[in-house]
Amino acid sequence: MEKEAEFEFTADSELDYDLLEPREVDFEGDEVEAQKAEALRAGLADFELDEEDLQILNQEFAAPESEDSGGWPVLAVVGRPNVGKSTLVNRILGRREAVVQDTPGVTRDRVSYPAQWAGKNFTLVDTGGWEVDVKGLDREVAAQAEAAIDRADAVLFVVDARVGATATDERVVKLLRSKGKPVILAANKVDSDVLEAEAASLWSLGLGQPFPISALHGRGAGDLLDEVLRVLPEESAVEGRLKRDGIHRVALLGRPNVGKSSLLNALAKETRVVVNELAGTTRDPVDEMIELDGQPWWFVDTAGIRRRMYKSIGADYYASLRTQSALEKAEVAMVLLDASEEMSDQDVRIIQQVIEAGRALVIVNNKWDLVDEYRQKELKGEQERALVQLGWAPKINVAAKTTWHTNRISRALNAALEGWQTRISTGRLNGFLGELVAANPHPLRGGKQPRILFATQVSTCPPRIVIFTTGFLDPAYRRFIERRLREEFGFVGTPIRISVRVREKRRR
């Protein structure tokens, strides 16, 4: 076996002791261990297995499905405020993804979603309400909608059939014609046959046939999507500019005013996002590509999370939803903590949110320039108590305002990503568990001792391991297995999913 990779990290402060690179894992495995694992696998034939068990056992290792929609054709949904664009987006997606309220102007930025119809994938882009001759925030929303058109292969123009064509709609039509993109006209809010005559009046816009639909009830949505597929190309002519090209995405998370935007500016070495002492300056996720140590990264600055999402209302709810979406699209989450303040329950909840999402994790203690020696010791104690189960997460101390130690971020991100992508061969995993159980057997339960029959890693990103047993494994024993897995194989910066499937012997 090749020698494990050495990693030396010199810490100037006490809280840097957790930053370790994951070890290199021998993916080929030992031939003897592989043979033993195959024998264990064959032994499962004596146990009752369901269809899902067989799928797990017979499938090849499942590489993570890429969420990158690069190359898919892009459809932009545009229209005036409150014509039902986000409701239509949710109807097409088949789930409540975009925020919908009765008041206009809820959607401000352009947000992309992977969508599918009749077996064809495409990217759906929701935009804010489009108005002309406006200023301030409304003008920025309109600019975002225009940018969405420039980066789309086709446009779905939504009009309120009950109101009819307005002067704003006619101005938008002129702009759409100047862009030269295919346009599908959706006459929304046609909830009955009686209103279809209202939709017919929209022929006057000169965009061809208006498709009468009710985004709220789903009426006519199928015919509209059939037309969308007819005009969309097989491959996007514009998505190349939007494609991530394998560049890793990092979400910056934390409470309001912990310095997320300041850190993004420090990494970019210029002002990319607005920074203000007023908490909550950032409302919508901001994507920026930044190069660290010669490696490009997509950083997403998110809104500060104030409270649990279900307790949020209005703009806070909207911001929380967008932050959650940014986390789900990222591979690594950097959770920023204000080192000068006592850790709060909200800090712990945000970290738990990352773990539940299955993302790689790096914890950053920001504002280190405001921390004295007494506070350093105090913070160390707080984090040892609050994050007792998170010794695997890299922790680094930085001062975004002065850029102190920001050069360590690239190394921490790569360490967490490597752990997130770690794969253990089935032979080596079963050999490891066999030795572990022999030395530390599971406690007796009701006079019986659960036995591990077979184990396999079914996926990475995050690593998921399925263990077949003859009985329930105590939570404490599962945590013991996870701890020893980390000691043996690294898994730095990543949660590990351990699933236990209890199976009984077949009755003869």
Image (spheres, helix red, strand yellow):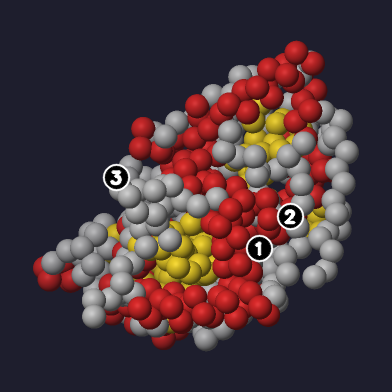
N-terminal label among 1 and 3: 3
Checking the image for residue 22, the label placed there is 2
Marks 2/1 in contact by CB < 8 Å: the verdict is: yes
Residues under labels 1 and 3: Cα distance?
Answer: 46 Å
Q: Which residue is drawn at 41% across and 86% down?
A: 230
Residue type highlighted by circle 3: Asp
Q: In which quarter of the image is residue 173?
A: bottom left
Please identify the quadrant where the N terminus is shown: bottom right
Checking the image for residue 320, the label placed there is none
N-terminal label among 2 and 1: 2
Viewer-side residue, 260 vs 140: 260
Callout 1 secondary element: loop
134 up-or-down from 239: above or below:
above
Q: Of tags 3 and 2, which is closer to the observer?
A: 2
Provide residue 30's location: percent of width, then percent of height: 70, 75
Please identify the quadrant where the C terminus is shown: bottom left
328 up-or-down from 12: above or below:
below
Q: Which residue appears farthest toward the front when viewing the image?
A: 447
Residue type highlighted by circle 2: Pro
Q: Is residue 497 left or right of residue 257?
A: left
Q: Of tags 1 and 3, which is closer to the observer?
A: 1
